[in-house]
Amino acid sequence: MLCAPGLRRFIVSQNIADEAIGFDRRGKGKSLFQRLRAYLSLVSDLRQRRYDLTIDLSDSKTSRILHRLLDAPLRVGFDPPERPLRFWEVQPANVYAATCGHGGIHYLYRYLSPLKALNIDLADSTPRLVPTCAAQSESAQILAQRSLVKNAYIVVHAGARFEGRCWQPERFAAAIDEVYAATGLRFFADWWPGRDNSRADNTRIGCVTCGERGWEGLA
């Protein structure tokens, strides 16, 4: 499975895929040449694996280009795409999945739709996340290091994938201060690396960046 780098460990530990290949498509801080080189390196690596089947769940312009370049014998894509193709775009898939799935409007059914297109019966469509023993131990250690009592703290995820969607750190700090004053509960602040968490009273926060533990600890 091709995914964001931070999800690799989570995907493998939850048995979502046997192997996860991390790739950051944002290319923040990289020049156009560096981004292009990264994509070419990715395509070269994936083509060498000679996949028999590829499924495009992202349904984006970039993912369709990758889908075409990998040139697997079976290529599953959505028909029609969620966003109509421009006149110069083509759908590289040769097996077509229903855009919205067959079980309802929830995105879960959209992501399961390729299975139906491949005539694979799905006995249970309920998604489940089961924390691994290693993840539970790691999470318990992090909470203990920051003096957070089980079932007596609040988690704040102070970040977003895109800078334009990030809430200002001082607003998170103000919200934390207000809730702490009303409840006395301490906070587990899941800060992205590089974010400024200095504006909140650290006696109220057990701070940790997402790089300190695997995503499966959230399960």
Image (spheres, rainbow, N blue to C red):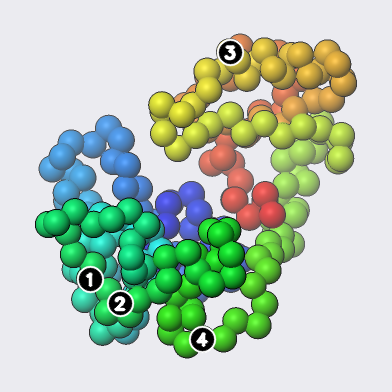
Of pointers 2 and 1, the one earlier in the residue sequence: 2
| Label 2 crowd (10 A; few <14 / some 14-19 / many >=20) | many
- Label disc, if present, on residue 170 of the rendered structure: 3
| Residue beneath disc 1 | 92
Labels in figure, total:
4
Q: Which residue in the protein does label 2 denote?
A: 75
Give the number of the mark in front: 1 or 3: 1
Name which quarter of the figure residue 85 lies in: bottom left
Secondary structure type for disc 4: loop
Q: Based on the displayed image, in which of its 4 quarters is residue 21 positioned?
A: bottom left
- List x then y, in percent, for residue 62: 26, 55
Q: Earlier in the sequence, mark 2 or mark 4?
A: 2
**Residue occupying image coordinates x 15% and y 40%:** 32
| Amino acid type, callout 4 | Ile
The kind of residue tagged 3 is Glu
Return the disc, 3 or 4, that comes first in the chain's sequence.
Answer: 4
Q: Tell me which amino acid carries mark 1.
A: Pro
> At 29% from the left edge and 59% from the top edge, which residue is drawn?
63
Gap between marks 2 and 4 measured at Cα = 15 Å
Label 3 Cα neighbours within 10 Å, binned few <14 / some 14-19 / many ≥20: some
Mark 3 element type = helix
Q: Left or right: 50 with respect to 36?
A: right
Q: Amino acid at mark 2?
A: Arg
Instruction: Name the residue that disc number 4 marks.
Output: 120
Q: Is residue 52 left or right of residue 161?
A: left
Name above or below for residue 28 compared with residue 170.
Answer: below
The reply to whether discs 2 and 1 touch (Cβ–Cβ < 8 Å) is: yes
